[in-house]
Image: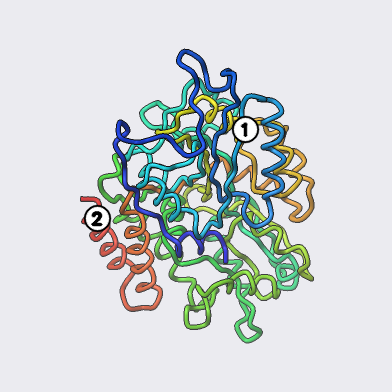
Protein backbone atom coordinates (compact mmCIF):
# COMPACT_ATOMS: atom_id res chain seq x y z
CA UNK A 1 0.00 0.00 0.00
CA UNK A 2 1.37 3.41 -0.91
CA UNK A 3 1.77 6.04 1.76
CA UNK A 4 -0.98 8.15 0.18
CA UNK A 5 -3.45 5.28 0.39
CA UNK A 6 -2.27 4.34 3.86
CA UNK A 7 -2.68 7.85 5.20
CA UNK A 8 -6.17 8.11 3.80
CA UNK A 9 -7.13 4.73 5.24
CA UNK A 10 -5.69 5.24 8.69
CA UNK A 11 -6.85 8.86 9.08
CA UNK A 12 -5.86 11.10 11.95
CA UNK A 13 -6.38 10.55 15.65
CA UNK A 14 -8.35 13.25 17.49
CA UNK A 15 -6.27 15.03 20.07
CA UNK A 16 -7.44 15.56 23.60
CA UNK A 17 -5.55 18.46 25.12
CA UNK A 18 -4.42 18.51 28.71
CA UNK A 19 -3.97 21.38 31.11
CA UNK A 20 -0.27 22.06 31.25
CA UNK A 21 -0.44 22.86 34.92
CA UNK A 22 -2.01 19.46 35.60
CA UNK A 23 0.27 17.40 33.36
CA UNK A 24 2.83 15.28 35.10
CA UNK A 25 6.26 14.42 33.74
CA UNK A 26 6.80 11.56 31.27
CA UNK A 27 8.01 8.17 32.38
CA UNK A 28 11.70 7.54 33.07
CA UNK A 29 12.54 11.24 33.39
CA UNK A 30 15.15 12.54 35.80
CA UNK A 31 14.71 16.21 36.62
CA UNK A 32 17.70 18.49 36.72
CA UNK A 33 18.64 20.14 39.98
CA UNK A 34 17.35 23.70 40.42
CA UNK A 35 19.50 26.17 38.55
CA UNK A 36 21.14 23.54 36.34
CA UNK A 37 20.30 22.17 32.92
CA UNK A 38 19.34 18.53 32.50
CA UNK A 39 22.40 17.80 30.41
CA UNK A 40 24.81 19.39 32.87
CA UNK A 41 23.51 17.84 36.12
CA UNK A 42 25.72 15.31 37.90
CA UNK A 43 23.45 12.31 37.35
CA UNK A 44 22.85 11.18 33.77
CA UNK A 45 19.50 12.23 32.34
CA UNK A 46 17.35 9.67 30.57
CA UNK A 47 14.89 10.94 27.98
CA UNK A 48 12.27 8.83 26.25
CA UNK A 49 11.70 8.84 22.50
CA UNK A 50 8.65 7.20 20.93
CA UNK A 51 8.74 6.77 17.15
CA UNK A 52 7.25 5.08 14.13
CA UNK A 53 9.83 6.22 11.58
CA UNK A 54 12.30 3.39 12.21
CA UNK A 55 9.75 0.58 12.28
CA UNK A 56 10.04 -2.03 9.56
CA UNK A 57 13.76 -2.21 8.94
CA UNK A 58 15.44 0.94 10.21
CA UNK A 59 15.62 0.13 13.90
CA UNK A 60 19.37 -0.53 13.68
CA UNK A 61 19.88 2.72 11.81
CA UNK A 62 18.09 4.64 14.53
CA UNK A 63 20.22 2.88 17.14
CA UNK A 64 23.34 4.05 15.31
CA UNK A 65 22.16 7.66 15.54
CA UNK A 66 21.25 7.26 19.22
CA UNK A 67 24.72 5.90 20.03
CA UNK A 68 26.37 8.82 18.21
CA UNK A 69 24.20 11.28 20.15
CA UNK A 70 24.98 9.66 23.50
CA UNK A 71 28.70 9.71 22.68
CA UNK A 72 28.51 13.43 21.92
CA UNK A 73 26.29 14.08 24.97
CA UNK A 74 27.58 11.76 27.72
CA UNK A 75 25.16 13.18 30.28
CA UNK A 76 22.07 12.14 28.30
CA UNK A 77 20.68 8.67 27.57
CA UNK A 78 17.90 8.05 25.06
CA UNK A 79 15.35 5.33 25.78
CA UNK A 80 13.73 4.39 22.44
CA UNK A 81 10.32 2.83 21.87
CA UNK A 82 9.45 1.96 18.27
CA UNK A 83 5.92 1.18 17.09
CA UNK A 84 4.26 0.30 13.81
CA UNK A 85 2.75 3.25 11.95
CA UNK A 86 -0.72 1.71 12.10
CA UNK A 87 -0.57 1.54 15.92
CA UNK A 88 1.45 4.63 16.72
CA UNK A 89 -1.13 7.40 16.78
CA UNK A 90 -3.63 5.43 18.86
CA UNK A 91 -0.85 4.84 21.41
CA UNK A 92 0.11 8.53 21.31
CA UNK A 93 -3.51 9.52 21.91
CA UNK A 94 -3.63 7.24 24.94
CA UNK A 95 -0.41 8.76 26.30
CA UNK A 96 -1.74 12.28 25.81
CA UNK A 97 -4.91 11.53 27.75
CA UNK A 98 -2.93 9.80 30.51
CA UNK A 99 -0.22 12.52 30.65
CA UNK A 100 2.46 9.91 29.93
CA UNK A 101 3.82 11.18 26.63
CA UNK A 102 7.47 10.52 25.91
CA UNK A 103 9.91 13.42 26.19
CA UNK A 104 10.28 13.38 22.40
CA UNK A 105 7.84 11.82 19.94
CA UNK A 106 7.19 11.62 16.21
CA UNK A 107 4.38 13.53 14.54
CA UNK A 108 3.30 14.15 10.96
CA UNK A 109 2.59 17.53 9.42
CA UNK A 110 -1.06 16.64 8.93
CA UNK A 111 -1.68 16.41 12.68
CA UNK A 112 0.71 19.14 13.84
CA UNK A 113 -1.97 21.81 14.12
CA UNK A 114 -4.19 19.73 16.38
CA UNK A 115 -1.36 18.88 18.77
CA UNK A 116 -0.11 22.45 18.89
CA UNK A 117 -3.56 23.91 19.50
CA UNK A 118 -4.16 21.52 22.38
CA UNK A 119 -0.96 22.45 24.20
CA UNK A 120 0.70 19.08 23.72
CA UNK A 121 3.93 20.47 22.23
CA UNK A 122 6.60 22.41 24.07
CA UNK A 123 7.86 25.59 22.37
CA UNK A 124 11.45 25.13 21.24
CA UNK A 125 14.04 27.74 22.16
CA UNK A 126 17.14 28.93 20.34
CA UNK A 127 16.82 26.60 17.35
CA UNK A 128 18.81 27.51 14.24
CA UNK A 129 16.13 26.76 11.66
CA UNK A 130 18.40 27.81 8.79
CA UNK A 131 19.78 24.27 8.72
CA UNK A 132 16.39 23.06 7.44
CA UNK A 133 14.62 23.93 4.18
CA UNK A 134 12.55 27.01 5.01
CA UNK A 135 9.23 25.50 3.96
CA UNK A 136 9.79 22.48 6.21
CA UNK A 137 10.82 24.48 9.27
CA UNK A 138 7.95 26.94 8.80
CA UNK A 139 5.46 24.07 8.61
CA UNK A 140 6.07 23.37 12.31
CA UNK A 141 5.98 26.95 13.57
CA UNK A 142 2.98 28.87 14.87
CA UNK A 143 2.90 32.63 15.45
CA UNK A 144 6.68 32.79 15.08
CA UNK A 145 7.40 30.01 17.60
CA UNK A 146 8.92 26.68 16.61
CA UNK A 147 7.03 23.71 18.09
CA UNK A 148 8.61 20.79 16.23
CA UNK A 149 11.58 20.04 13.99
CA UNK A 150 11.32 18.23 10.64
CA UNK A 151 12.94 14.81 10.79
CA UNK A 152 12.42 13.58 7.24
CA UNK A 153 10.45 14.25 4.10
CA UNK A 154 9.27 12.56 0.95
CA UNK A 155 7.37 13.87 -2.03
CA UNK A 156 5.32 12.79 -5.02
CA UNK A 157 6.73 12.67 -8.54
CA UNK A 158 5.67 11.28 -11.91
CA UNK A 159 7.01 7.78 -12.51
CA UNK A 160 7.06 6.60 -16.11
CA UNK A 161 7.81 3.40 -18.03
CA UNK A 162 10.39 4.35 -20.63
CA UNK A 163 9.87 1.15 -22.62
CA UNK A 164 6.17 1.88 -23.09
CA UNK A 165 6.99 5.44 -24.17
CA UNK A 166 9.54 4.14 -26.67
CA UNK A 167 7.12 1.55 -28.06
CA UNK A 168 4.43 4.21 -28.56
CA UNK A 169 6.88 6.73 -29.99
CA UNK A 170 6.03 9.29 -27.28
CA UNK A 171 8.62 11.70 -25.90
CA UNK A 172 9.51 11.31 -22.22
CA UNK A 173 8.00 13.72 -19.66
CA UNK A 174 9.99 16.85 -18.84
CA UNK A 175 9.83 19.41 -16.08
CA UNK A 176 8.04 21.73 -18.52
CA UNK A 177 5.07 19.44 -19.04
CA UNK A 178 1.56 20.65 -18.23
CA UNK A 179 -1.62 18.66 -17.67
CA UNK A 180 -2.35 19.02 -21.37
CA UNK A 181 0.96 17.35 -22.24
CA UNK A 182 0.33 14.54 -19.80
CA UNK A 183 -3.20 13.99 -21.10
CA UNK A 184 -2.05 13.87 -24.73
CA UNK A 185 0.68 11.37 -23.90
CA UNK A 186 -1.65 9.22 -21.78
CA UNK A 187 -4.14 8.94 -24.62
CA UNK A 188 -1.43 7.75 -27.02
CA UNK A 189 -0.03 5.29 -24.48
CA UNK A 190 -3.33 3.70 -23.47
CA UNK A 191 -4.10 0.35 -25.13
CA UNK A 192 -7.03 -1.14 -23.23
CA UNK A 193 -7.14 -4.20 -25.48
CA UNK A 194 -3.61 -5.04 -24.35
CA UNK A 195 -4.35 -4.11 -20.75
CA UNK A 196 -2.00 -1.11 -20.92
CA UNK A 197 -3.04 2.15 -19.29
CA UNK A 198 -1.53 5.55 -19.91
CA UNK A 199 -1.90 7.11 -16.47
CA UNK A 200 -2.77 6.47 -12.85
CA UNK A 201 -3.55 9.08 -10.22
CA UNK A 202 -5.70 8.23 -7.19
CA UNK A 203 -9.06 9.98 -7.02
CA UNK A 204 -8.69 11.21 -3.48
CA UNK A 205 -8.40 14.17 -1.14
CA UNK A 206 -4.61 13.99 -1.24
CA UNK A 207 -4.52 14.36 -5.00
CA UNK A 208 -7.31 16.94 -5.07
CA UNK A 209 -5.73 19.53 -2.76
CA UNK A 210 -2.53 19.25 -4.80
CA UNK A 211 -4.37 19.56 -8.12
CA UNK A 212 -6.16 22.67 -6.81
CA UNK A 213 -2.75 24.17 -6.04
CA UNK A 214 -1.52 23.17 -9.51
CA UNK A 215 -4.44 25.18 -10.89
CA UNK A 216 -3.41 28.24 -8.89
CA UNK A 217 -6.03 27.83 -6.17
CA UNK A 218 -6.24 26.90 -2.50
CA UNK A 219 -8.25 24.30 -0.67
CA UNK A 220 -8.98 26.60 2.27
CA UNK A 221 -9.12 30.32 2.92
CA UNK A 222 -6.06 32.01 4.41
CA UNK A 223 -7.51 31.83 7.93
CA UNK A 224 -8.57 28.20 7.46
CA UNK A 225 -12.15 28.96 8.46
CA UNK A 226 -13.80 28.27 5.11
CA UNK A 227 -13.21 26.44 1.84
CA UNK A 228 -11.72 28.15 -1.18
CA UNK A 229 -12.10 25.47 -3.86
CA UNK A 230 -15.69 25.97 -5.06
CA UNK A 231 -14.44 27.87 -8.09
CA UNK A 232 -12.77 27.26 -11.44
CA UNK A 233 -9.54 26.01 -9.86
CA UNK A 234 -11.48 23.40 -7.89
CA UNK A 235 -13.57 22.38 -10.88
CA UNK A 236 -10.47 22.08 -13.06
CA UNK A 237 -8.75 19.96 -10.38
CA UNK A 238 -11.73 17.63 -9.97
CA UNK A 239 -12.14 17.33 -13.73
CA UNK A 240 -8.45 16.48 -14.14
CA UNK A 241 -8.71 13.64 -11.65
CA UNK A 242 -12.09 12.17 -12.51
CA UNK A 243 -12.00 12.32 -16.30
CA UNK A 244 -9.09 9.85 -16.37
CA UNK A 245 -11.21 6.99 -14.99
CA UNK A 246 -12.21 4.61 -17.78
CA UNK A 247 -10.31 6.56 -20.44
CA UNK A 248 -6.59 6.53 -19.66
CA UNK A 249 -6.72 4.81 -16.27
CA UNK A 250 -8.76 1.94 -14.80
CA UNK A 251 -12.07 2.55 -13.03
CA UNK A 252 -12.88 1.41 -9.52
CA UNK A 253 -14.77 -1.52 -11.03
CA UNK A 254 -11.56 -2.51 -12.81
CA UNK A 255 -9.63 -2.54 -9.57
CA UNK A 256 -8.46 1.05 -9.20
CA UNK A 257 -8.25 2.07 -5.58
CA UNK A 258 -7.78 -1.41 -4.17
CA UNK A 259 -4.64 -2.01 -2.07
CA UNK A 260 -1.43 -2.15 -4.10
CA UNK A 261 -3.34 -2.17 -7.41
CA UNK A 262 -1.39 0.75 -8.86
CA UNK A 263 2.03 -0.48 -7.76
CA UNK A 264 1.37 -3.95 -9.19
CA UNK A 265 0.10 -2.47 -12.45
CA UNK A 266 3.27 -0.41 -12.85
CA UNK A 267 5.57 -3.26 -11.78
CA UNK A 268 3.87 -5.55 -14.33
CA UNK A 269 4.74 -3.11 -17.11
CA UNK A 270 1.09 -2.27 -17.79
CA UNK A 271 1.14 1.36 -16.67
CA UNK A 272 2.92 4.14 -18.54
CA UNK A 273 2.68 6.99 -15.97
CA UNK A 274 2.11 6.83 -12.24
CA UNK A 275 1.68 9.63 -9.68
CA UNK A 276 3.18 8.34 -6.45
CA UNK A 277 5.85 8.96 -3.85
CA UNK A 278 9.59 8.50 -3.82
CA UNK A 279 9.15 5.91 -1.08
CA UNK A 280 8.32 3.47 -3.92
CA UNK A 281 11.85 3.55 -5.38
CA UNK A 282 12.98 0.52 -3.42
CA UNK A 283 10.08 -1.66 -4.57
CA UNK A 284 10.99 -1.27 -8.25
CA UNK A 285 14.55 -2.53 -8.13
CA UNK A 286 13.84 -5.77 -9.98
CA UNK A 287 11.28 -4.71 -12.59
CA UNK A 288 12.24 -5.93 -16.10
CA UNK A 289 11.89 -2.60 -17.87
CA UNK A 290 13.44 0.87 -17.91
CA UNK A 291 11.78 3.56 -15.85
CA UNK A 292 12.50 7.04 -14.54
CA UNK A 293 10.79 10.00 -12.88
CA UNK A 294 9.95 13.61 -13.64
CA UNK A 295 8.50 16.58 -11.80
CA UNK A 296 4.71 16.29 -11.75
CA UNK A 297 3.05 18.39 -14.44
CA UNK A 298 0.90 21.32 -13.36
CA UNK A 299 -1.98 23.23 -14.87
CA UNK A 300 -1.08 26.88 -14.32
CA UNK A 301 1.86 26.13 -12.01
CA UNK A 302 3.85 23.29 -10.44
CA UNK A 303 2.87 22.09 -6.98
CA UNK A 304 4.28 18.85 -5.62
CA UNK A 305 2.78 17.02 -2.66
CA UNK A 306 5.23 16.69 0.21
CA UNK A 307 4.86 14.54 3.29
CA UNK A 308 6.91 15.32 6.34
CA UNK A 309 7.58 13.76 9.72
CA UNK A 310 8.80 15.79 12.67
CA UNK A 311 10.12 15.53 16.22
CA UNK A 312 8.22 17.22 19.02
CA UNK A 313 9.16 17.77 22.64
CA UNK A 314 6.38 17.05 25.09
CA UNK A 315 4.97 20.06 26.91
CA UNK A 316 5.04 18.03 30.13
CA UNK A 317 8.62 16.81 29.82
CA UNK A 318 10.78 17.57 32.85
CA UNK A 319 13.90 17.48 30.71
CA UNK A 320 13.04 19.81 27.87
CA UNK A 321 16.61 21.00 27.28
CA UNK A 322 17.97 17.47 26.90
CA UNK A 323 14.93 16.49 24.84
CA UNK A 324 15.44 19.41 22.47
CA UNK A 325 19.11 18.49 22.05
CA UNK A 326 18.06 15.02 20.92
CA UNK A 327 15.40 16.43 18.58
CA UNK A 328 17.96 18.73 16.96
CA UNK A 329 20.54 15.93 16.62
CA UNK A 330 18.01 13.50 15.15
CA UNK A 331 16.82 16.09 12.65
CA UNK A 332 20.01 17.82 11.51
CA UNK A 333 23.24 16.03 12.50
CA UNK A 334 25.71 14.76 9.90
CA UNK A 335 25.39 11.29 11.40
CA UNK A 336 21.64 11.34 10.77
CA UNK A 337 22.17 12.55 7.20
CA UNK A 338 24.76 9.92 6.29
CA UNK A 339 22.79 7.13 7.98
CA UNK A 340 19.55 7.99 6.19
CA UNK A 341 21.21 8.32 2.80
CA UNK A 342 23.13 5.08 3.14
CA UNK A 343 19.97 3.21 4.14
CA UNK A 344 17.61 4.87 1.66
CA UNK A 345 15.53 5.82 4.72
CA UNK A 346 13.44 8.74 3.47
CA UNK A 347 15.27 12.03 2.94
CA UNK A 348 17.01 14.02 5.67
CA UNK A 349 15.54 17.53 6.04
CA UNK A 350 18.71 19.56 5.58
CA UNK A 351 19.02 22.80 3.62
CA UNK A 352 22.62 22.15 2.52
CA UNK A 353 22.05 20.25 -0.72
CA UNK A 354 25.74 19.37 -0.94
CA UNK A 355 25.12 16.91 1.90
CA UNK A 356 22.48 15.21 -0.21
CA UNK A 357 24.67 14.64 -3.27
CA UNK A 358 25.14 10.89 -2.58
CA UNK A 359 21.38 10.50 -3.05
CA UNK A 360 21.61 11.69 -6.64
CA UNK A 361 23.88 8.82 -7.64
CA UNK A 362 22.34 6.07 -5.53
CA UNK A 363 20.95 4.13 -8.51
CA UNK A 364 17.54 4.03 -10.17
CA UNK A 365 15.81 6.24 -11.00
CA UNK A 366 18.42 8.15 -12.99
CA UNK A 367 16.70 11.53 -12.68
CA UNK A 368 16.76 11.80 -8.89
CA UNK A 369 17.32 15.51 -9.35
CA UNK A 370 13.58 15.68 -10.03
CA UNK A 371 13.01 14.98 -6.33
CA UNK A 372 14.73 18.24 -5.41
CA UNK A 373 13.37 20.15 -8.38
CA UNK A 374 9.89 19.27 -7.12
CA UNK A 375 10.61 21.14 -3.90
CA UNK A 376 10.63 24.44 -5.78
CA UNK A 377 6.85 24.27 -5.72
CA UNK A 378 5.45 22.47 -2.67
CA UNK A 379 1.84 21.80 -1.71
CA UNK A 380 1.48 20.74 1.92
CA UNK A 381 -1.73 18.96 2.91
CA UNK A 382 -4.03 21.45 4.70
CA UNK A 383 -4.50 20.62 8.36
CA UNK A 384 -7.65 21.61 10.27
CA UNK A 385 -7.18 19.67 13.48
CA UNK A 386 -9.80 17.29 14.82
CA UNK A 387 -12.01 17.45 11.73
CA UNK A 388 -9.22 16.31 9.42
CA UNK A 389 -10.50 12.80 8.76
CA UNK A 390 -14.03 14.01 8.05
CA UNK A 391 -12.76 16.63 5.59
CA UNK A 392 -10.67 14.06 3.75
CA UNK A 393 -13.58 11.62 3.55
CA UNK A 394 -16.03 14.27 2.34
CA UNK A 395 -13.82 15.33 -0.54
CA UNK A 396 -12.84 11.79 -1.55
CA UNK A 397 -16.49 10.65 -1.47
CA UNK A 398 -17.67 13.52 -3.67
CA UNK A 399 -14.85 12.96 -6.17
CA UNK A 400 -15.80 9.28 -6.29
CA UNK A 401 -19.40 10.24 -7.10
CA UNK A 402 -18.21 12.39 -9.99
CA UNK A 403 -15.84 9.71 -11.30
CA UNK A 404 -18.67 7.17 -11.28
CA UNK A 405 -20.95 9.54 -13.19
CA UNK A 406 -23.45 9.83 -10.35
CA UNK A 407 -22.81 13.58 -10.04
CA UNK A 408 -21.46 16.27 -12.29
CA UNK A 409 -18.03 17.60 -11.42
CA UNK A 410 -19.48 21.03 -10.68
CA UNK A 411 -22.12 19.61 -8.34
CA UNK A 412 -19.61 17.32 -6.61
CA UNK A 413 -17.24 20.22 -5.93
CA UNK A 414 -20.08 22.39 -4.63
CA UNK A 415 -21.37 19.61 -2.38
CA UNK A 416 -17.91 18.95 -0.99
CA UNK A 417 -17.38 22.65 -0.28
CA UNK A 418 -20.75 22.95 1.46
CA UNK A 419 -20.11 19.96 3.70
CA UNK A 420 -16.55 21.00 4.58
CA UNK A 421 -17.74 24.56 5.33
CA UNK A 422 -20.30 23.10 7.75
CA UNK A 423 -17.49 21.09 9.37
CA UNK A 424 -15.28 24.18 9.71
CA UNK A 425 -18.15 26.29 11.05
The local crowd at label 1, few if under 14, some if 14 to 19, many if 20 or more residues have their Cα within 10 Å, is many
Instruction: Kindly identify which numbered label has been placed on residue 423.
Output: 2
Q: Position of residue 317 (x, y in %)?
A: 44, 32
Which residue appears at 52% of the width and 75% of the height?
A: 258
Seen as rendered, the residue at the extreme top is: 35
Query: Does residue 351 appear in this view?
Result: yes
Looking at the rendering, in which quadrant would you find the N terminus?
A: bottom right
Instruction: List the residue tagged with mark 1.
Output: 77
Measured along the vertical axis of the image, is residue 225 above or below residue 242?
above
Which residue appears at 24% of the width and 55% of the height?
A: 423
Q: How is the image coloured?
A: rainbow
Q: Position of residue 147 (x, y in %)?
A: 44, 32
Measured along the vertical axis of the image, is residue 188 above or below residue 219?
below
Foreground tag (2 vs 1): 1
Instruction: Kindly identify which numbered label has been placed on residue 421.
Output: none
Measured along the vertical axis of the image, is residue 343 above or below residue 158?
above
Amino acid sequence: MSRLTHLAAVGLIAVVGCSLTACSGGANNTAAAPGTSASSSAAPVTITYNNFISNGGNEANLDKIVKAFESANPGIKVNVKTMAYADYFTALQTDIVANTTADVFDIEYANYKAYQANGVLAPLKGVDTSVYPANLADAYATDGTQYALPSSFSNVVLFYNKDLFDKAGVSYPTADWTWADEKAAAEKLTDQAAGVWGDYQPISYYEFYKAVAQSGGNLLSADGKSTAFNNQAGIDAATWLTEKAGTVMPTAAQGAGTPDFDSKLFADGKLAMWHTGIWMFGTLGDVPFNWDIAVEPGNTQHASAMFSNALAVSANSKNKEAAQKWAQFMSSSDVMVSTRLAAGWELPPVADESKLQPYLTAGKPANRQAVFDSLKGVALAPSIGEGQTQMQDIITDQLTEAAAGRASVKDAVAAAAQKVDALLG
